[in-house]
Structure formats: C-alpha cells, structure tokens
Image: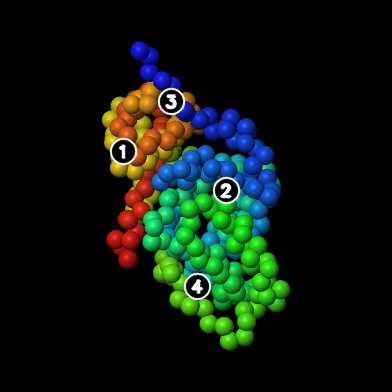
Amino acid sequence: MAMASLPIFDVDQWTEDNKSSFVPPVCNKLMYGAGQLKVMFIGGPNQRKDYHIEEGEEFFMQLKGDMVLKVVEKGQHKDICIKEGEVYLHPSRIPHSPQRFQDTIGLVIERERTKDEFDGLRYYVDGTTDPLWEEWFYCYDLGTQLKPVIEKFFASEEYKTGKPPKGKVFPPPPVNIDTKTSTSPPFSFKKWLEDNRKEIAEKGRKVLFGNGEFQLTVWGEGELEVEHDGETLLWQMEGEAEVTCARGTGTMKAKTCILIQAGERYTVKRHPGSIGLTVTTNPLANKCKE
C-alpha cells in the first residue's frame, strides 16, 4: 500500500495564494497555529504605536523588503531594522512594536503560551517610556484578540488626552519586564550560511540560535531519525530532502516547509547540496534562567 503524501507547503505559492491577507486591515495569516508553534507571515503597511509584551521569544525572518522593530531596551527607545534576508531572535519580556511597510513579507514564529502566562499591550506617553495605557490578557489567538484591545484604547480618555489620569498608579504588571538584556543585531542568513557552510558540510549541522527557548539548527547532507516532545518546523533552504513519518512521505524542495507534530517520529534524508532548517522550542528554557 502506497504511503500518503505529506502536506508540504511551497512558501512562495502559499504567500501568493494568501496575498489578500497581507494588506490592511489584516496584514497577517497563520500557516500553522493549532499547536505549540505559531508560524505566521506578515505584510504591510502596518504602522503601530502599541508595544507587545510576551513571556516567549519571537523569531523573525524578513523574506521581502525591510521592516523596523521598535523596542524599549533597558529603559530606552530603540529601532531595530530587519532587512530583507535577515534573521533576528527577539528576547522574551522586552516590549516591541513591529513597523511594516507596503509590499513586504516577513516570517514570524512565536510559541503557544502556558496557562500561567500573560501578554500585554502597552502604549507610552509620546517621547517617553512612561506608560500611558496597558492591558494584560491570556493569549490564545493574537490575530483575533489584538483588535478589541486596540479598540478599547482608542475609546479611552488616555487616547484622547495623550496622558494618563492624574494620580493614576499602574499596578505591577503580571510579567517581569526585562530591563537588563541587550538585543543582538539582525544578520544576513545568506552571509551566515556562506561563513559556516564548510562546518555544516563537515559536522552535518550548525546551531543558528540555541541559547534560549527557540532552537534553530541548520543541517547539511545526511539522514536523521528524530522524535521530539514538541512540534518541529522543517524548512528547506537549498536542494532537496525526503521526509517520512507515520502520516506519509514527501519531497521537500527549496523554500518549502512542513510541521512535524509533537511526539511524531520522523526521518529526513537530505540530498547532496541540501540545506535545511529545523525550529523547535522549549517554553521553560528562559524561566530556568530567571
């Protein structure tokens, strides 16, 4: 009996098929979102003044055009420019506000929140890092939960005046906001790959990011059998690879991806000239450092 074909996405075709989602007012669409990994593509223009605060990291890969990520780092406003072809891992618990432009597309990966975690949207008094208005909530679907929170702010007195009510004292947030970590600059994935291609060929792999919650590893030619407790995103960067699991089998070509389910044993055979990326996450990794 022939094995079923695995649901492998061609990223360019998928973004083209969903291009109506990457313009206002939506600007984003989830490719995968039912489980641990939230894999989304985001377009623009999308100019925002709200800052998102979450307890998990966020991975950015800018596929088309540039974007700016406004952050509040160590109590100071800062702009991080993520250019086309660059990757960036945003640390947990640092306020950030993505600014996206017309005719751009970016990949963002977040993780599922644990039941005791909160997300926050915060607005600052213009020109300062003093909070103007904020709301905290358990996030199960940021795509639908964001809009009503923003509308609530637009209906507030703070939005009309640009100032918090006289004498207002904000209670301690349910998230321990990071005021000590310095963000690392984005970098060109293509250049990183060229600088590390020899090591990948010799050792079979090289960690792209791996000091926190997200583990991103770049793999070269070879065969590997894996079973991971959480979900795994396979992203084929160059060449071809064969993927097999209990659900079926499939061929991955350049710029294709598939999500392996939590606890699902799979085999991936990367052909000569193949370069693949795996993405997994451990939600407890950063909590162990606190």
**Residue 102 visible at all:** yes
Callout in the foreground (2, 1): 1
Expressed as whole percent of the image width and height from the top left, the position of residue 47 reads 66, 57
Element type where label 3 sits in the image = loop
Residue carrying label 2: 83
Which badge, 2 or 3, comes first in the chain's sequence? Answer: 3
Q: Say whether disc 4 or disc 3 marks the residue closer to the N-terminus.
A: 3
At a point 59% along the width and 35% down the height, the residue shown is 15
Q: Is residue 212 above or below residue 127?
A: above
- Disc number at residue 75? 4
Residue 263: image tag: 1
Relative image position of residue 224 (x, y in whole percent): 29, 30
Q: Earlier in the sequence, mark 2 or mark 1?
A: 2
- Of residues 131 and 114, the one nearer the viewer is 114
- Residue type at mark 1: give it: Gly
C-alpha span from label 3 to label 1: 17 Å
In the picture of the structure, the residue carrying the numbered disc 3 is 6
Classify mark 2: residues with Cα within 10 Å, few (<14), some (14-19) or many (20+): many
Is the residue 79 above or below the residue 17 in the image? below
Mark closest to the chain's N terminus, 4 or 1: 4
Q: CA distance from mark 2 to mark 3?
A: 32 Å
Residue 93 pos. (x, y %) = 44, 63
Q: CA distance from mark 4 to mark 1?
A: 41 Å
Q: Does the CB distance between marks 3 and 1 fall below 8 Å?
A: no
**Left of 76 or right of it: where is 204?**
left
Determine the CA span between mark 4 and mark 2.
Answer: 25 Å
Could you tell me the amino acid type at mark 2? Lys
Q: Amino acid at mark 4?
A: Gly
Nearer the N terminus, badge 3 or badge 1? Answer: 3
Q: Are marks 4 and 3 in contact (CB under 8 Å)?
A: no
Residue at screen point 42% across, 54% down: 113
